[in-house]
């Protein structure tokens, strides 16, 4: 009861599809919507899962469970246990599955049994709100990323980030090359050639050069 107002405030601040939604979130969610349309077998529940895995679970739950990632705080065992309950509730709110409660149900499901339906609706409304926002163009997205990059130029090691990205790309190199070859936008920007040039420079991969 003491924490309830803070938990509600957290849900409202995170699941608020107004002008504070970052352009990258709108841009990426629209991309997921487009992919769902391209593949006829993608239903609304699967699309919901895509969005849930990309932002609420990947980002917000991680911060909920590990506040010391962004704040200079010491998390005691008691606080950690409480955050675990809240983060699990947040995860449940992002799922379409309905859980039947019993005496054996986990404590977090029993504690938030009354609120979970409200939280689930907040998640649905959040996704719907973002879908109804004005689309972010490629040009606007590039401008936004350039500004973010400018603001953090001295704070990030871009070489390390690029190396980690390439390690992932190298693991799925053939699949990525094939996908780039089949994508009109990638063809216009010659992304296949660029990736091949990087591979040739870093690993002497056999390319079409």
Image (tube, grey):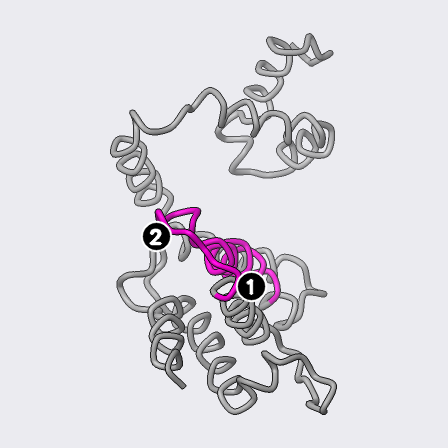
- Report the predominant secondary structure element of the magenta stretch: helix
Q: Disc 1 marks which residue?
A: 52
Q: Is residue 39 above or below residue 173?
A: below
How many discs appear? 2
Instruction: Report x, y in % for residue 80.
Output: 51, 62
The circle drawn on residue 16 is: none
The circle drawn on residue 23 is: 2
> In which quadrant of the rendered view does residue 43 lie?
bottom right
Quarter placement of the C terminus? top right
| Residue 44 shown in magenta | no
N-term mark: 1 or 2: 2
Residue found at x 44% / y 79%: 122
Mark 1 and mark 2: span between their CA atoms?
17 Å
Image-based side of 96 in relation to 149, left or right: right
- What segment is highlighted magenta in the picture? 49-78
* Mark 1 surroundings within 10 Å by alpha-carbon count, few (fewer than 14), some (14 through 19), many (20 or more): some
Q: Is residue 148 above or below residue 69?
A: above
Quarter placement of the N terminus? bottom left
Residue found at x 55% / y 60%: 57
């Amino acid at each position: 009861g003491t924490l309830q107002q803070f938990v509600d405030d957290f849900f409202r601040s995170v699941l608020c599809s107004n002008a504070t939604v970052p352009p990258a979130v709108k841009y990426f969610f629209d991309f997921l919507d487009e992919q769902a349309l391209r593949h006829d077998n993608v239903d609304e529940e699967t699309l919901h899962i895509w969005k849930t895995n990309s932002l609420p679970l990947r980002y917000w739950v991680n911060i909920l469970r590990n506040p010391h990632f962004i704040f200079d705080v010491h998390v005691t065992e008691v606080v950690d246990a409480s955050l675990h309950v809240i983060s699990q509730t947040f995860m449940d709110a992002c799922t379409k599955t309905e859980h039947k409660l019993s005496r054996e149900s986990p404590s977090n499901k029993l504690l938030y049994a009354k609120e979970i339906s409200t939280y689930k609706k907040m998640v649905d409304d959040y996704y719907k709100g973002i879908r109804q926002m004005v689309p972010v163009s490629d040009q606007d997205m590039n401008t936004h990323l350039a500004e973010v990059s400018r603001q953090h130029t001295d704070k990030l090691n871009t070489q390390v980030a690029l190396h980690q990205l390439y390690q992932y790309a190298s693991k799925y190199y053939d699949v990525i090359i094939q996908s780039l070859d089949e994508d009109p936008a990638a063809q216009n920007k010659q992304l296949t050639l660029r990736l091949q040039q990087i591979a040739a420079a870093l690993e002497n991969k056999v390319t079409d050069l």
